[in-house]
Image (cartoon, rainbow, N blue to C red):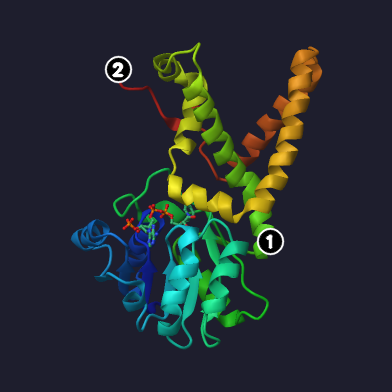
Amino acid sequence: MTKPFDRVALIGIGLIGSSLAHAMRKHKLAGEITGYARSEATRAKAMEISLVDIVFPTAAETVKDADLVILCSPVGTYGELAREIGPRLSPGAILTDVGSVKGAVVRDVLPHVPRDVNFIPGHPIAGTEQSGPESGFAELFINRWCILTPLPDSDTGAVERLADFWRACGSNVEVMTPEHHDLVLAITSHLPHLIAYNIVSTAADLEEVTSSEVIKYSAGGFRDFTRIAASDPTMWRDVFLNNKDAVLEMLGRFSEDLSALQRAIRWGDGDMLFDVFARSRQIRRGIIEAGQDTASPDFGRGAPKSQ
Ligand code: NAP
């Protein structure tokens, strides 16, 4: 049984913050939950649906007496928030985050963290394309990985306690360096989002194909990209601005491979196309075997509603 935290402060109460609030309540991981969001509307909604015990209009007030503080806003906000909360953090507290990049988070947050606070960056590899305080659910983290990127001098007891917290939320925990995290996520998450945003934008700009046709025939594959491309624009702008090097490295490799496919199509090299497509199919099978997606046809969507 994981020892609950006395007071957990959520800085940001959107999809990830509200899912954490639900998971903490369900598994009794916090004596009290405090929350901060910048808008009055989000703070009011968080109280109305009892996500947190109390909301505050400033991050500094929210972290008072907290033994666990979790940054759950877009990564571009972390530096300023850390500067504000740094002097208010309790000695011995754990400060963590859920941001989708890690190197830039260490760069922006660490300078503001007092020596007696345990700063342990983290990233749950779990999400949906929804945002806001009503989008969260307790099961979001179940059977998903949570990556922790402790610093070389992080207290091992604090790292283990945070790992236990994520396990209690249903996650598997992996530890790696921030640099390795950023490289892995560049290919598994950031590049797929960039490609999805780009393909939707290219389709939107086409003049020979009407937008009603793009929507009407989207079941041919396009709609699966639109789900990813519906993700929060602020969050994703911040991801690309803060994981520039790794994304550009992966984009370079991707462009080379795309050119090879382009050449194979031009020269009618069916063997090459077949080999690439067959290997990709194997990777999909591996994801299903690892329990990271459903094996049901069409992602288990079932028949669409009749028009
Ligand atoms: P979200 O649903 O859009 O919620 C963002 C929260 O941050 C809201 O409470 C928002 O307050 C607050 N916020 C936004 N801009 C702010 C600013 N300038 N200053 C202070 N607070 C601000 O976002 P999310 O999907 O939960 O993502 C939060 C973090 O989780 C991001 O760092 C993201 O990289 C990471 N993450 C996301 C996913 C995913 O799939 N979505 C997965 C893993 C990790 P208001 O409501 O008042 O605007």
Q: Is residue 296 visible?
A: no
- Check disc 1 and report the residue beneath it: 179
Instruction: Answer with left or right where residue 114 lies relative to residue 306.
Output: right
Between discs 1 and 2, the one toward the N terminus: 1
Separation of disc 1 and disc 2 at Cα? 48 Å
Please name the amino acid that badge 2 sits on.
Ser
Q: Nearer the viewer, mark 1 or mark 2?
A: 1
Quadrant for residue 288, please give it: top right
Quarter of the image that includes the C terminus: top left
Residue 296 image point, x, y percent: 49, 31
Residue 26: image quadrant is: bottom left
Asked if disc 2 is less than 8 Å from ligand 1, the answer is no
Residue closest to the eye, 9 or 105: 105
Q: Quadrant of ligand 1?
A: bottom left
Q: Residue at x 27, y 62 (%)?
A: 51
Packing grade of label 1 (10 A; few <14, some 14-19, many >=20) is some
**189 or 4, which is in the foreground?**
189
Name the residue that disc number 2 marks.
306
